Structure formats: structure tokens, C-alpha cells
Image (tube, rainbow, N blue to C red):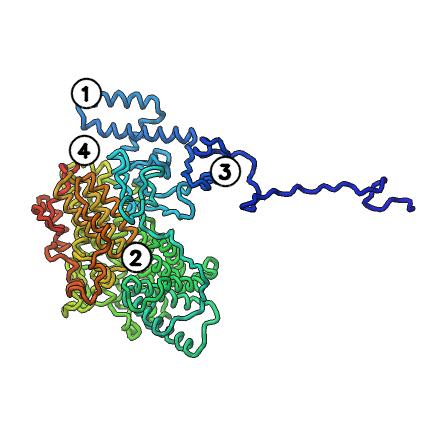
């Protein structure tokens, strides 16, 4: 026996004890480790009532999710105290506002109550003063709670992540200039006026319950947005990124893109693109497929995707499977988004990202489009596209191509900012790039000297626009249209910055009324400067030999013009600011009434552009199909507000209800091929029903039409439609409609009043004049 014992043995010869770690216990169903035995900070009301352990998950705990019941967490005591205090402050502010409209006895009682309240609540006097001035920052933010009032909506609208259902995405911030925000304000005002949520349309067949009466926050922005950003952009099957469509499909889809969207957003030079596409198709015919990822392949697929999207909206013969545009988009992602966050910006990458934005816009995915455009504009800034190109080695035609790409980026980004109410990434004072030269794109390669056309750049501030607008171009072409589009977009952006700043930080009341006059003058000068082929007061027939082409261009400019007027005049119609409710002099009072009238008139002018019988194909083929829902929902939000402000049961309310019904019928016809329009249709129905109930207006015909489904006319082939609906834009303007420029000038006359109503949809025939008698309690 050895002198020393062997290793790992004790003197008795037995092995030592080894500590074995405890095995984790697994649940038999989920096969996941048991949750922590620690207590959660809050238990939901249901688990508390049943005296069972709550998992604390949001928005629904484990027990409530398994039981399929609603999960509600009570606010903490300090949160409840803050909420109640805020409500008391707002009610006190309301009492102070109502005191001037009551008798002496009631005013004395209100003073006593407010005096007692101010002694008990710290800083109550200062907070109430700020609330009267529209400074909601005096109160703590309560976004996402059920006690949100109209006053908290003055900055914008966002959504609390804790209140969203599972597997949904937030609508995100929506600014004050967005029609989504306007619709939400109407809804909140109705709830506050009625004291409870209005009657629901969810009892109507096939209408989703967008505004549940109980159990959720009636003010959630997700209930009012018709954007489709929650829709997935992925498919449940693999997509070959290197597959190329047939030559017929590729050429047809690219032609759809260039014929319908390129003039408004010249993001790609057409001839070089078509040359590269022919080379790609020739290689595919010879059996050579691309083997490497490239941005050029991303550009091809994005053009195909946008063309395919248009083909589905118009039911074109080229359309394929309903997912074909999404397949092209997935291929473009594979080619165009590789290392996009780490590589240096280049022109092709900016074009790829901007085409993604245009595709998402056409699909109603507005937030995705806005994010992509922000990145594309940043890349363009990095490349210096926003400044005048003085490089002598760059040919003039290439300079012109680059500046047109810049203006396409500019237009698309500003359109998305207007739709969402979100800030732009661009600062106009830092731009020095000239306006496009008045030449068609096909003529650019043959022009040796373009610099002579660039002696006038885009001038800032806009007071210098008259120098540009005083001498319109004699030759009308797509460049003339692009220039006009840039000018109206610049004016529109200036209006948004002036009238819709976050938290009213930009309101300077000593110059807001003069600025209104200035913007109106600029809009009128712009409209008068347009050549006859692009005038917005009447829309041409495409078969009219005196107006060859430019049908869609005139429609786009008309929609933009009315949109600018609505943005400019809507604050005067709503009168949410004290200065609008209590003008200091007669001139201000007249301007407020005139602008409120102009807002309704512009909204009704958009309605009058639409034929009485809905024909989606006609609208897509002759209008801004990529954003047409936005251009229809803007006047809807204005007219719904007008109905709430008109006398109950009045003819004015009836006439405006007819206009809303007309747009709702168009949206119903469009929803067959467009989920974007379908969502907008449902929201319009629900808010219209609630507004009509308050205004004592009958909307039972809409219920009947909805129950009966789409009318026979919506299914009528284009070959069977009456001729006036199959050609051009001749019916887009009611012949009784007053020309835009004349209407704007007439509305500025202090003695101007509309004739008595004759039950027409003509805005110039309405007697609705939003004066003092139409706003009880607001003066």
C-alpha cells in the first residue's frame, strides 16, 4: 500500500461529495423557466378581484390573456391625483371663460368657487392664466390617458405604447396640420359636448368598431388614422431577389410609372433608365441573370413596384397577382438597403430611398414613407444637391438633371410632412438651387448652354415671388408644371410653419393677420401666373385640342391650391385660440369671418371637382393617385367641423353633409382595390354619424347604401360608362363653380355674402357664413 492516498479520495477511501447545481424547473406547456417569484409592482383589476398572482405584463397579463378577458391596470395613487388635479384645473379654466357670458349672480358664484380653488391648489392662478393663453406646457403631459381634453391637442397627437393591443404598431406623432389630428379634435369635442361617446357605427354590417364606447381611451390616435403602417411588408414565402419579369411586364410597368408619376416626381432621368432596362432585358433573353446585388437592380424593382401598384388601382391588364408589387419591393430591399447606414451617401442610394418612400406613400404607409424621405433628403444634403452647382466641369444638362432630382425630393418630402403634420428636414433659407429651366426632359441633352436660364434662383423669403411669377413661361411643358408645383409647395410649407407650430411657439399675434393677407396674395399671384393650360379654376377635357395633355398636371395643381387655402384658413374656422375668439378690432373680426368662409369654400371646391357618380378609375387616371385619399380627407375634416359649428338642423349643415356623403361614396367605390381608402371610408362613416346626430341631420341613406353594398355603377366596365366620365377632366369642375382666384378675392370683400342656398353642392351657392350667430358661446 502506498504511503500517500490516491488523489480525490479521503482517508476512509470514499469519494468526496460534489455540489450539483439545482436544475431549472420548466413549465410543461411553454418549456420556459418559471417566472421570478418576486412580486410585480401592480396587479391588474381582474387578478386583484380573483386574488390570484398577476404576471404584470402589458397591455394584458398572462391570466387575462389566457381567459380572453379585458385587462385593466388601475392608476397609481399619485397618477390618479395628478389626473384629477389636471381635470380640476381645466374645469376652472372653463369656468373663467364662461364667467363673462353669465349674469351677475352666477359670475359672483363662479368667482367664489375659483377663489377657493386657487387657495387649495398650488400655482393655480398661474396655470389658469397659461391655459387661457393656450400654453398647455403648464400642465404635465398626460398623453395616453383617458382624461385627455381638447386643450391637450394643441401641440399634436401621439400614442402611448402601453395602450396599444399586442402585435400592433403605433401611429406615431401626428401634428396639428394633419387631417388625422383634425378628425381627432372633432371626436373629442363631440365626447365633451355630449358627455359620453356618441352612438357607434359598429352595429352597421361589416363596419369595424373603430371607436369602442367603453373599455378603452376614446381619444387614441390609432382610432383616427387611416394610414396603413401597421400592415406588414413581408411575405410568408421566399422571394428570389435576382428574378427578372418578362420583357412585356417590365416595359409596361416602367411605362406606367413614367407616364403617371414621373412628371410630378422626376427622381430618375427617363432615357438613361430605359436604356439600362433594355440592356437588362436583353441579357435576360440571352440567359444571363444578375449575379450580384446592385442599386441599379433596386431602382428597376422599385419602378416595377410603383407601376404594379398603379396597375392594381386601375385594374390595368398588366396587373398580376395581388402581391406582385410587394414582391418587387422585397427584391428592391435586398438590393438597395444593404449597408445603407454605413456607406457614404451617393446619388443612386438617395434615388433608391426616395422611390421606397413614393412606393410606401402609394400604399398608404405614410410613416414609412416619411422616415425614408428624411433619410433621402439627408443624403441629398450630403451630396450638395440643395445648392447651386458651380462646377465648370459638369455639363449643363447634367446640372439640370441633378436639380430636378433635388426638386423631386423636395416635393415628395414636403408632401409627406403636410400629410403627417411632422417637421421637415429641410431649411429653405439654406437652399440656393435654381428652379428648373422651361425645357422638356427630352431636349436637355441637345442644349449646350442652360446657364442662361438659371439667372433666377428660388428666392427667399417668399415676398420676392412676384419677380418670378410676373412673367409666366410662353411654352408649357412638364418643366413648367414642375416649377409651378415647387412654388405652391414652398408657399404651403411657409403656411404650415407659421400657423401650425408645436405648442404655438411661433404665434406672434401682432403679425399673424398681416401674414394671412400676404399668403393669400401669394396664392392668388401664383394662380394668376399659371399658363392657360395649367390654370386651376377650370380643368380641361383631355380631348380638347386647345389643351393637349396636362390633365393630371392641372388636377394636381388644383388639389394643391385648395389644400393650401384650407391650411391657411382652418385656424380661423376652428377658433381654438383666444385671439380668434376675441378679436381686438372690427378689421380682425372681418378677417376671421372671411377666412372661415374661405376654408369651407375651399373644402367644397374640392368636392365640386368630383363627378356625382363615383368612378375610381377616372380619378386614378386623371389625378394624384399616389395621395388622392389625403386630398379627399382634408375637406372631409373641414366639412365635419363646419357641420358641428352650423346651427342644429340648418340648411347649411344639410348641404355640408351632402358634400361629406359624396366623398364617402367615392371612398366606398375606391375601397374595392385600396385598403387605404377603405380605412378612410370607415372613419368617415363613424364620425359623420356622430356629427349628424348632434346636428340633427339625416344620414340614413348612407346606412342603406352601405347595407346594400357597392352600387351597380361601381362595377360598371369603363366601356359602358357615359362618355363624360371616360374622357379627361371636363367634369372635375362644376360649371357653376366660381373661379378660384375670383372666389378668393370675393371672400375678402367685407360686404361679401353667399346667395341663399339652393341645395346644390356648389360652394359659391352656399349661404353658410361663419359669423357670430353661427358660433354660440364663442364670442
- What secondary structure is found at the residue carrying circle 1? helix
Which residue shows up at 24% across the image and 35% down it?
A: 194
Mark 3 and mark 1: Cα distance apart in space: 55 Å
Mark 2 and mark 1: Cα distance apart in space: 59 Å
Evaluate if marks 2 and 1 touch, with contact meaning CB atoms under 8 Å apart: no
- What secondary structure is found at the residue carrying circle 3? loop
10 Å neighbourhood of mark 3: few (<14), some, or many (≥20)? many
The residue indicated by pointer 2 is 674
The residue indicated by pointer 4 is 777
- Quadrant of the rendered image containing residue 524: bottom left
Mark 3 and mark 2: Cα distance apart in space: 41 Å
**Looking at this rendering, what residue extends furthest in the bottom direction?**
286
Mark 3 vs 1, N-terminal side: 3
Evaluate if marks 1 and 4 touch, with contact meaning CB atoms under 8 Å apart: no
Mark 1 vs 4, N-terminal side: 1
The residue indicated by pointer 1 is 105
- What secondary structure is found at the residue carrying circle 4? loop
Which residue shows up at 17% across the image and 37% down it?
A: 775
- What secondary structure is found at the residue carrying circle 2? loop
The residue indicated by pointer 3 is 55
Amino acid at each position: 500500500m502506498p504511503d500517500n492516498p490516491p488523489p480525490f479520495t479521503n482517508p476512509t477511501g470514499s469519494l468526496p461529495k460534489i455540489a450539483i447545481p439545482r436544475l431549472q424547473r420548466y413549465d410543461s406547456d411553454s418549456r420556459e423557466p418559471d417566472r421570478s417569484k418576486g412580486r410585480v409592482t401592480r396587479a391588474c383589476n381582474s387578478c386583484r378581484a380573483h386574488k390570484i398572482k398577476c404576471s404584470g405584463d402589458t397591455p394584458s397579463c398572462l391570466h387575462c390573456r389566457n381567459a380572453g378577458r379585458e385587462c385593466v391596470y388601475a392608476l397609481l395613487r399619485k397618477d390618479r391625483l395628478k389626473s384629477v388635479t389636471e381635470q380640476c384645473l381645466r374645469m376652472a379654466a372653463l369656468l373663467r371663460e364662461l364667467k363673462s357670458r353669465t349674469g351677475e349672480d352666477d359670475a359672483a358664484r363662479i368667482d367664489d368657487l375659483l377663489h377657493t380653488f386657487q387657495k387649495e391648489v398650488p400655482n393655480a392662478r398661474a396655470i389658469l392664466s397659461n391655459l387661457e393663453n393656450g400654453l398647455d406646457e403648464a400642465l404635465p403631459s398626460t398623453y395616453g390617458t383617458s382624461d385627455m381634453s381638447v386643450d391637450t391637442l394643441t401641440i399634436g397627437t401621439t400614442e402611448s405604447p402601453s395602450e396599444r393591443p399586442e402585435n400592433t404598431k403605433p401611429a406615431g406623432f401626428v401634428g396639428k396640420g394633419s387631417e388625422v389630428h383634425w378628425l381627432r379634435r372633432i371626436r373629442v369635442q363631440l365626447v365633451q359636448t355630449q358627455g359620453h361617446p356618441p352612438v357607434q357605427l359598429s352595429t352597421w354590417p361589416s363596419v369595424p368598431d373603430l371607436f369602442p364606447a367603453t373599455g378603452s381611451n376614446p381619444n387614441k390616435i390609432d382610432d383616427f388614422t387611416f394610414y396603413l403602417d401597421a400592415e406588414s411588408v413581408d411575405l410568408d414565402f421566399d422571394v428570389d431577389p435576382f428574378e427578372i419579369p418578362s420583357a412585356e411586364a417590365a416595359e409596361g410597368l416602367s411605362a406606367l410609372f413614367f407616364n403617371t408619376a414621373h412628371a410630378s416626381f422626376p427622381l430618375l432621368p427617363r432615357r438613361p433608365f430605359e436604356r439600362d432596362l433594355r440592356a437588362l432585358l436583353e441579357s435576360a433573353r440571352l440567359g444571363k441573370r444578375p449575379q450580384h446585388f446592385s442599386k441599379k437592380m433596386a431602382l428597376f424593382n422599385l419602378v416595377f413596384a410603383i407601376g404594379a401598384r398603379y396597375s392594381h388601382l386601375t385594374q390595368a391588364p398588366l396587373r398580376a397577382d395581388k402581391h406582385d408589387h410587394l414582391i418587387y419591393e422585397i427584391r428592391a430591399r435586398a438590393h438597395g438597403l444593404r449597408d445603407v447606414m454605413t456607406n457614404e451617401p451617393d446619388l443612386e442610394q438617395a434615388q433608391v430611398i426616395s422611390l421606397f418612400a413614393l412606393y410606401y406613400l402609394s400604399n398608404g404607409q405614410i410613416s414609412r414613407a416619411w422616415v425614408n424621405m428624411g433619410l433621402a433628403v439627408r443624403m441629398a444634403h450630403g451630396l450638395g444637391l440643395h445648392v447651386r452647382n458651380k462646377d465648370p466641369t459638369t455639363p449643363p444638362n447634367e446640372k439640370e438633371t441633378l436639380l430636378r432630382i433635388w426638386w423631386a425630393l423636395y416635393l415628395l418630402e414636403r408632401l409627406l410632412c403636410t400629410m403627417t403634420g411632422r417637421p421637415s428636414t429641410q431649411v429653405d433659407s439654406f437652399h440656393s438651387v435654381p428652379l428648373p429651366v422651361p425645357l422638356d426632359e427630352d431636349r436637355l441633352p441637345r442644349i449646350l448652354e442652360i446657364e442662361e436660364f438659371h439667372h433666377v434662383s428660388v428666392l427667399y423669403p417668399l415676398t420676392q415671388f412676384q419677380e418670378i411669377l410676373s412673367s409666366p413661361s410662353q411654352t408649357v411643358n412638364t418643366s413648367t408644371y414642375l416649377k409651378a408645383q415647387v412654388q405652391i409647395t414652398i408657399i404651403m410649407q411657409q403656411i404650415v410653419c407659421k400657423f401650425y407650430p408645436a405648442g404655438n411657439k411661433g404665434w406672434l399675434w401682432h403679425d399673424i393677420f398681416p401674414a394671412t393677407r400676404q399668403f393669400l396674395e401669394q396664392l392668388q399671384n401664383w394662380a394668376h401666373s399659371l399658363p392657360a393650360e395649367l390654370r386651376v379654376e377650370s380643368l380641361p377635357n383631355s380631348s380638347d385640342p386647345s389643351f393637349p395633355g396636362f390633365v393630371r398636371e392641372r388636377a394636381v395643381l388644383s388639389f394643391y391650391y385648395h389644400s393650401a387655402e384650407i391650411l391657411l384658413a382652418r385656424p380661423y374656422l376652428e377658433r381654438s385660440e383666444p385671439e380668434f375668439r376675441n378679436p381686438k378690432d372690427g378689421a380682425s373680426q372681418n378677417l376671421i369671418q372671411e377666412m372661415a368662409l374661405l376654408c369651407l369654400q375651399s373644402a367644397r371646391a374640392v368636392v365640386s371637382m368630383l363627378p356625382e357618380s363615383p368612378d375610381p378609375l377616372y380619378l386614378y387616371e386623371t389625378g394624384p393617385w399616389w395621395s388622392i385619399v389625403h386630398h379627399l380627407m382634408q375637406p372631409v375634416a373641414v366639412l365635419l367641423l363646419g357641420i358641428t359649428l352650423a346651427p342644429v338642423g340648418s340648411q347649411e349643415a344639410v348641404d355640408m353633409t351632402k358634400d361629406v356623403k359624396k366623398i364617402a361614396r367615392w371612398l366606398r367605390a375606391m375601397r374595392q382595390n385600396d385598403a387605404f381608402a377603405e380605412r378612410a371610408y370607415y372613419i368617415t362613416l363613424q364620425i359623420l354619424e356622430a356629427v349628424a346626430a348632434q346636428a340633427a341631420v339625416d344620414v340614413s341613406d348612407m346606412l342603406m347604401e352601405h347595407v346594400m353594398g357597392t352600387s351597380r355603377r361601381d362595377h360598371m366596365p369603363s366601356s359602358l360608362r357615359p362618355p363624360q366620365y371616360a374622357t379627361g377632366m371636363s367634369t372635375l369642375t362644376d360649371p357653376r363653380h366660381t373661379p378660384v382666384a375670383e372666389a378668393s378675392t370675393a371672400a375678402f370683400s367685407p360686404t361679401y355674402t353667399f346667395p341663399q342656398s339652393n341645395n346644390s353642392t356648389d360652394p359659391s351657392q352656399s349661404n353658410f357664413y361663419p359669423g357670430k350667430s353661427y358660433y354660440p358661446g364663442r364670442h
